[in-house]
Image (cartoon, rainbow, N blue to C red):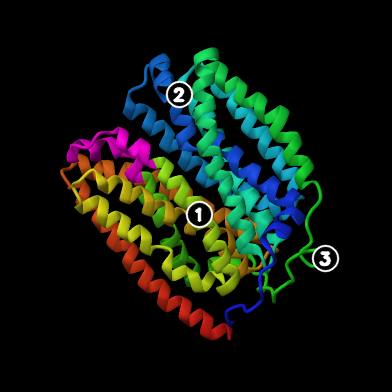
Amino acid sequence: MSASTERPAAFVPFVTGNARWLGGAFLLCACSSFGQTFFISLSGGEIRRELGLSHGDFGLLYMLATLASAATLPFLGRLIDRFPTRIVAAATILGLAAACLLMASVPTVPLLLVALYLLRLCGQGMMSQTAFTAVGRWFVAQRGRAVSLVTIGYQAGEATLPLIFVSAVGMLGWRGSWYASAAFLLLLGLPVIYILVHRERDPRSVHASDAPKPAARDRKLSEVLRSPSFYLLCAAVVAPPFIVTTIFFHQVYLADLRGWPVEFFASGFVLMSAATATCALTCGWLIDRFTAVRILPFFLLPLTVACLVISQVTSPVAIFVFMGIVGVSNGFAATLFGALWPELYGIRHLGAIRSIVLSVLVFGSALGPGLTGFLIDRGVSYPLQIAVMGFYCLGAALVLTVWSRRHVRLAD
């Protein structure tokens, strides 16, 4: 398979001609924020105080809920292979709204666990699953560009919803703000997204702005699970959620070790979001030009550098260097993961395949903070752990280079 020499469709006509599908998937990613860690943590202090939970208690509940959602995704995620996008999207939004309502009224610890489980399953899990599986099917030659635009929905949610939620807490209280979140999903998110994705996009249509490329052979999930390459890829793609979630979760501990102001991490998120959005678009163009398989060996290199910087540099400037490079890594990873699987395994069983991958990513994000916390408690240097993570990324990049060249050679 040679690098594509087709000239990509002009950006503005591509966006305007496909606004409904891009907009629907973009909003699915943005609305997934209600089930993401950064949003749920905004009311973590109030939840702990009202239910009498320690930091460790709440962290354990959150980990259990996240792991349970990861275990459920392989079963629910394949629904997108059987039902239209609009049906799965509507059901997921309704489930997320129900989770918000339960969180708003949660009276006991067991119900809190259920609420967290539903938030993680419907928000972090199924909203992302639906958005990227649909885009993987709707677009072919311009898949990279489409995925990169949709990915920015995450940054839009991160940039706007926490500020809105915090402002609402001042007027409505934390429970009232969760009620308002449910109302937003039901009254605005559900009808708008349903209308936008009501009609499936056919990439073979004469009106489509991206001419079809030769499609990968559609592989069944059972066939994919028998392939050693799939497990090699999973071992590589799990690195970003494992590492980034771990470092953000223990950011206060790292700041204390270095004597850094904790506020520096918070201020670095703006830089990270800008770098993520920019590099997501760049990666989309590169994928359409060279294919996702050819780009794959490079996506872990920025994370390698980020880990080595934050583990070895003691100056506070390391925070901003780290956040900027993590933004580069996040942008490339998010776009790459959206385009890689349909390129390798086709689109007929894409929902089932992506659900397995997504469960691996969620499992990694849940395991990282707990494993590193366990090692910290036993005296293992946290900066040393981060450095080891960086060398893992470097080793994985080298392995992916060998695999990518072999895959391209066999495909030619």
Examine the structure image and report whether residue 276 is included in the region drawn in magenta: no
Task: Look at the numbered discs 2 and 3 and tell me whether their residues touch, using CB distance below 8 Å.
Answer: no
Secondary element type, mark 3: loop
- The foreground one among 378 and 174 is 174
- Which stretch is magenta? 246-268
**Disc number for residue 43:** 2
**Which residue is at 26% across, 57% downward?**
308
Q: In the current view of this chain or complex, which residue is farthest to the left?
A: 379
Secondary element type, mark 2: helix
Given the image, on which type of amino acid does mark 2 rest?
A: Ser
Given the image, on which type of amino acid does mark 3 rest?
A: Ser
* Alpha carbon distance from label 1 to label 2: 30 Å
Q: From the viewer's perspective, is 59 left or right of 258?
A: right
Residue that label 3 marks: 205
Secondary element type, mark 1: helix
Q: From the viewer's perspective, is 243 left or right of 5?
A: left
Q: From the viewer's perspective, is 48 left or right of 99?
A: left
* On screen, residue 297 above or below 315: below
**Which residue is at 58% across, 53% downward?**
355
* Alpha carbon distance from label 2 to label 3: 47 Å
**Disc number for residue 278:** 1
- The foreground one among 374 and 216 is 216
First in sequence: mark 1 vs mark 2: 2
Examine the structure image and report whether residue 266 is included in the region drawn in magenta: yes
Given the image, on which type of amino acid does mark 1 rest?
A: Thr
